[in-house]
Image: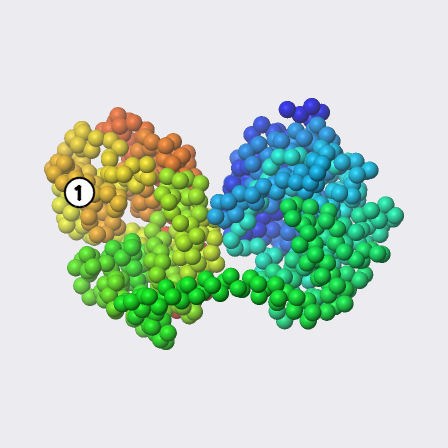
C-alpha cells in the first residue's frame, strides 16, 4: 500500500516488430486495479501485426492510447513522441519485447507515492532464451554497506553505477522536461538521458525488488548487428559530457566515473565481434582514442573499482586488464591492443583444442552409413533437387504434399523425392518418388539435395550445407504453446532439449504461417532468422476448392450411410495422459445421437483406439485414414477439444464446429495456450458430457448464433486461405518470386 497522496503514472511503449512479445508486455502493464495509469504505445511504422494488436487492446482498455506514426522515428524518436503526449506525474519508458513482473507496476507506483523522488530506480532480471532468469540486484552494485533507500544530492556520485538503461527507472515528468533532455536518434539513444537525470536529480529512490524482466532474445537486437551505426555511441557520450559542462563545477564529482563507464562501453562495442565491421575497427579505435584524450579527467590514469566492477565478486583482474587497455587507447595503438587481445585469446583456444581432438576421435570411430554421409557432404550440391518429408518420415501428407504437387505443376525442373521410414514405404502413392530413411540412397540424398521441405524438424544428424535451403511448413495453428514457450510448461516439454531444438530450427530459411496468431507464436517460440511466409497453409487449398461431387465420392469411399450427418471427432493429445482415453463415453454419444448421425473417430496419431471397442454401425474409426483433408470435406460437422484441426476445418464456410472443453483449465495449466478458445470459440462450447449430448440432440450447433461465432473465427484465423497458398509457397521458394511470400490482398 502507498502511504503518500495518489499520483499518475505514464508508461511509454515504443513498438516496432515485436508481435510475438507484445501481448505479454501489454498484459503485464495494464494492471486492472490502477485507474491512474496511462499507457502510451507508439507504433513506429511496425511492418508486422503489432499495430493491429495495439488497436485490439486499446478497444478493450481506455487507459491505452495508441499513436500510429507515418514515418519511422527510431526508438529514441518514438520515446520522444510518447513523452510529448504523456500527462502523468511520472514517466516510465518500457521496451515492448519485455514485461513487468506480476506485481511490478503496482510496486513501482506505490514506491513513487511513498517517496516522491525525481528518479526511482528498481531492480530487473534478465530472462534468457533458454528459460534462465538472472537478477541484477541493485544493492549488490554498491557492495558494502547496502545502498540506502533514498539518495540525496550529498551522495549522488555512486548512483552512476545504476546502469544506463531507460526501462528500469521512473522519472518525474516535470523534472525531465525541465532539464530539456530528449532521446536522440540512432543506436544507444538512451544514454544521454539516463545518465544526466541521475546526475541532476536531487532525490533518487531505490526499490530493491525485481519489477521488470529484460528479455535476452536470441535474434533481433539491432545492437548485436554489425554496422557503422555503432559509431553513434561517440555522439551520444559527447552529449553527456556537454551536459556535465552545463552543470559547472558540480559535475566534477561525476567525471571520473562517467569517463570510465564511457570507455568501458566503447570497448564492449569494439570487442563484440558482431557489432563493428572488421573494416571499421581501426577507425572506431581511433575515435575511441580521441574520446579518451578529450574527456580523461586530470590525473585519472586507472579505472576505479566503483566505476566498472562494483558488481563483480573479484574485480581485480578485470581492472588490471582495463588499465592495460587504457594505455593502448591513450596512444591510439591498435596493433599493441590487438597483440594483447590475441594473447588472451590463445589461452582460451587451448581448452577448445582439446575438445576438437576428442571430437575428431569420435568422428574417426564412425562407420557405415554415417561415414558415407560425411563423404557425400564433400560432393557438390545438386541444383534443382528437393527433399520432401512429413511427420517424422511417416508418409505423404500435409503441407509438404500440397507443395510437392504444386511444384510438379509450376516448377517441373525441380527433381523431388520423398523420405519415408521403412514401415511406410508400401503406402506411398503411385508415381511419387521416395527413398527409405537409413539407406545409402537416403544419406546421399540428404547430403546433396538443395531444397528440404518438412512439417517437422529433420533429425539431429542432418547437416545443413551452405547453399541448401530448408523450409519449415509446420502442421497446425498453435492454440497450444510450442517451441521455447514450452519451457514454462514442463508437462508439455517432457524433457525436451531446447538447445538441440534451436539448433535444428536454425537450419530454416523459410517458415510458413497460417494466420497472424501463428506468426506471433512462431516468432516468439522459434526465434530464428527464417523468412516468415504469411501465405496460409498449402494443405488447405483443397478445402477452398472442394466441390459437391468430390464430397459425394469421399463419403462413398468412407462408407458413410446416405442421409446421415457425419460428425468428425478429432481429439488432441494431452501430455498429462499416456494413452488414448476419450473425454466422454463415445458409445453412449453415438447411441443417444440416434440414427440421424454417424461418428467419424480420428484419434491423434500418438494414439490408436483399441480394436473391437466401437459399434461399427454408429462409429467409423478413421484414425488410420491417410488424408485428413478428405475427412473434412466428407463430414458435416466437427467435434473437437483443442486440436489445431479446428482452424483448418473453419476454412469450410458451412460446417459447424463444437468444442468439448471439459478439462480446459487443466489443459491450460499443463500445456499452455496462446489464447482462450472458450472466449473466442469457432462455435458451440460444451463443458460436460450431458451438455454435449443435449446440444447435438437439439441441433444447436447449426443455430445462427454459433454460425456467427464461426464466421468471426474464420475472419480471424483463416484470412489468407484463398486456395493459392501452395502456389505462393512454390513461387517464393523454387522460383524466387519475393512478392509471393507476402499475405494475399483481401
Q: Which x, y percent locates residue 629?
A: 26, 50
* 677 in relation to 478, above or below: above
Query: In front here: 66 or 145?
Result: 145
From the viewer's perspective, tell me whether residue 575 is left or right of residue 624. Answer: right
Give the total number of marks visible in the rendering: 1
Q: Secondary structure at mark 1?
A: strand
Residue 361 at x, y = what percent? 38, 66
> Please, is residue 415 above or below residue 252 in the view?
below
Observer-nearest residue: 691 or 124? 124
Q: At x 69% / y 31%, what residue is drawn?
A: 112
Label 1, residues with CA under 10 Å away: few <14, some 14-19, many ≥20: many
Query: Does residue 619 appear left or right of residue 43 in this picture?
Result: left
Q: Position of residue 281 (x, y in %)?
A: 66, 68
Q: What is the x, y in percent for residue 82? A: 66, 44
Q: Which residue is mark 1?
A: 621
Q: Is residue 676 visible?
A: yes
Q: Residue at the location (78% across, 43% down)?
A: 157
In the shown orientation, is residue 240 left or right of residue 315?
Answer: right
- Which image quarter holds the N terminus? top right
The residue located at (37%, 32%) in the rendering is 666
Identify the residue shown where x is 34% and y is 51%: 475
Q: Quadrant of residue 723?
A: bottom left
Say which quarter of the image contains residue 407. Answer: bottom left
Amino acid at each position: 500500500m502507498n502511504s503518500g497522496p495518489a499520483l499518475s503514472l505514464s508508461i511509454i511503449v515504443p513498438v516496432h516488430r515485436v508481435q510475438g512479445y507484445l501481448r505479454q508486455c501489454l498484459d503485464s502493464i495494464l494492471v486492472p486495479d490502477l485507474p491512474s495509469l496511462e499507457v502510451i504505445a507508439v507504433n513506429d511504422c511496425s511492418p508486422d501485426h503489432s499495430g493491429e494488436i495495439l488497436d485490439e487492446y486499446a478497444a478493450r482498455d481506455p487507459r491505452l492510447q495508441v499513436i500510429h506514426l507515418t514515418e519511422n522515428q527510431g526508438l529514441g524518436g518514438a520515446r520522444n513522441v510518447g513523452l510529448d503526449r504523456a500527462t502523468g506525474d511520472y514517466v516510465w519508458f518500457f521496451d515492448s519485447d519485455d514485461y513487468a513482473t506480476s506485481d511490478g507496476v503496482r510496486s513501482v507506483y506505490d514506491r513513487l507515492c511513498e517517496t516522491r523522488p525525481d528518479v526511482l530506480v528498481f531492480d530487473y532480471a534478465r530472462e534468457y532464451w533458454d528459460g534462465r532468469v538472472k537478477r541484477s540486484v541493485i544493492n549488490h552494485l554498491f557492495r558494502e554497506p547496502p545502498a540506502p533507500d533514498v539518495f540525496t544530492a550529498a551522495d549522488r556520485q555512486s548512483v552512476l553505477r545504476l546502469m544506463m538503461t531507460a526501462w528500469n527507472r521512473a522519472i518525474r515528468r516535470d523534472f525531465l522536461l525541465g532539464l530539456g533532455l530528449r532521446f536522440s536518434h540512432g543506436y544507444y539513444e538512451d544514454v544521454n538521458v539516463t545518465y544526466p537525470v541521475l546526475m541532476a536529480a536531487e532525490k533518487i529512490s531505490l526499490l530493491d525488488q525485481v519489477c521488470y524482466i529484460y528479455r535476452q532474445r536470441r535474434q533481433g537486437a539491432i545492437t548485436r548487428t554489425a554496422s557503422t551505426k555503432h559509431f553513434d555511441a561517440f555522439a551520444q557520450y559527447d552529449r553527456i559530457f556537454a551536459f556535465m559542462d552545463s552543470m559547472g563545477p558540480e559535475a566534477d564529482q561525476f567525471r571520473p566515473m562517467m569517463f570510465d563507464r564511457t570507455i568501458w562501453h566503447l570497448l564492449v562495442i569494439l570487442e563484440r565481434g558482431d557489432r563493428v565491421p572488421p573494416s571499421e575497427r581501426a577507425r572506431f579505435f581511433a575515435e575511441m582514442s580521441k574520446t579518451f584524450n578529450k574527456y580523461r579527467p586530470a590525473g585519472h590514469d586507472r579505472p576505479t573499482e566503483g566505476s566498472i566492477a562494483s558488481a563483480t565478486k573479484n574485480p581485480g583482474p578485470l581492472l588490471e586488464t582495463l588499465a592495460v587497455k587504457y594505455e593502448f587507447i591513450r596512444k591510439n595503438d591498435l596493433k599493441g591492443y590487438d597483440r594483447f587481445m590475441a594473447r588472451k585469446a590463445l589461452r582460451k583456444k587451448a581448452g577448445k583444442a582439446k575438445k576438437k581432438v576428442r571430437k575428431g576421435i569420435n568422428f574417426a570411430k564412425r562407420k557405415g552409413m554415417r561415414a558415407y554421409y560425411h563423404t557425400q557432404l564433400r560432393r557438390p550440391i545438386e541444383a534443382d533437387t528437393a527433399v520432401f518429408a512429413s511427420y517424422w518420415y511417416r508418409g505423404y501428407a500435409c503441407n509438404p504434399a500440397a507443395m510437392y504437387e504444386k511444384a510438379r505443376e509450376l516448377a517441373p525442373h525441380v527433381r523431388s523425392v520423398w523420405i519415408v521410414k521403412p514401415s511406410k514405404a508400401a503406402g506411398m502413392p503411385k508415381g511419387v518418388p521416395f527413398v527409405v530413411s537409413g539407406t545409402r540412397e537416403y544419406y546421399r540424398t540428404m547430403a546433396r539435395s538443395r531444397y528440404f521441405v518438412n512439417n517437422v524438424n529433420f533429425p539431429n544428424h542432418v547437416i545443413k550445407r551452405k547453399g541448401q535451403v530448408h523450409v519449415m511448413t509446420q502442421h497446425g495453428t498453435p492454440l497450444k504453446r510450442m517451441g521455447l514457450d514450452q519451457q514454462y510448461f514442463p508437462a508439455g516439454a517432457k524433457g525436451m532439449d531446447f538447445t538441440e531444438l534451436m539448433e535444428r530450427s536454425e537450419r530454416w530459411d523459410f517458415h510458413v504461417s497460417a494466420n497472424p496468431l501463428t506468426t506471433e507464436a512462431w516468432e516468439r517460440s522459434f526465434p530464428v532468422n527464417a523468412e516468415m511466409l504469411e501465405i496460409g497453409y498449402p494443405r488447405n487449398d483443397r478445402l477452398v476448392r472442394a466441390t459437391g461431387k468430390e464430397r459425394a465420392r469421399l463419403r462413398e469411399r468412407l462408407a458413410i450411410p446416405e442421409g446421415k450427418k457425419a460428425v468428425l471427432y478429432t481429439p488432441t493429445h494431452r501430455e498429462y495422459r499416456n494413452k488414448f482415453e476419450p473425454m466422454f463415453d463415445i458409445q453412449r454419444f453415438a447411441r443417444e445421437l440416434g440414427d440421424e448421425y454417424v461418428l467419424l473417430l480420428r484419434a491423434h496419431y500418438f494414439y490408436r483406439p483399441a480394436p473391437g471397442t466401437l459399434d461399427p454401425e454408429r462409429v467409423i474409426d478413421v484414425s488410420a485414414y491417410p488424408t485428413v483433408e478428405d475427412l473434412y470435406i466428407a463430414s458435416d460437422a466437427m467435434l473437437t477439444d483443442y486440436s489445431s484441426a479446428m482452424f483448418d476445418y473453419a476454412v469450410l464456410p458451412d460446417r459447424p464446429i463444437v468444442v468439448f472443453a471439459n478439462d480446459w483449465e487443466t489443459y491450460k495449466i499443463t500445456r499452455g495456450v496462446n489464447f482462450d478458445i472458450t472466449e473466442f470459440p469457432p462455435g458451440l462450447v460444451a463443458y460436460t458430457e450431458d451438455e454435449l449430448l443435449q446440444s447435438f440432440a437439439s441441433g444447436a450447433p447449426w443455430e445462427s448464433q454459433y454460425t456467427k461465432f464461426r464466421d468471426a473465427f474464420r475472419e480471424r484465423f483463416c484470412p489468407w486461405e484463398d486456395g493459392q497458398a501452395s502456389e505462393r509457397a512454390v513461387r517464393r521458394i523454387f522460383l524466387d518470386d519475393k512478392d509471393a511470400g507476402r499475405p494475399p490482398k483481401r
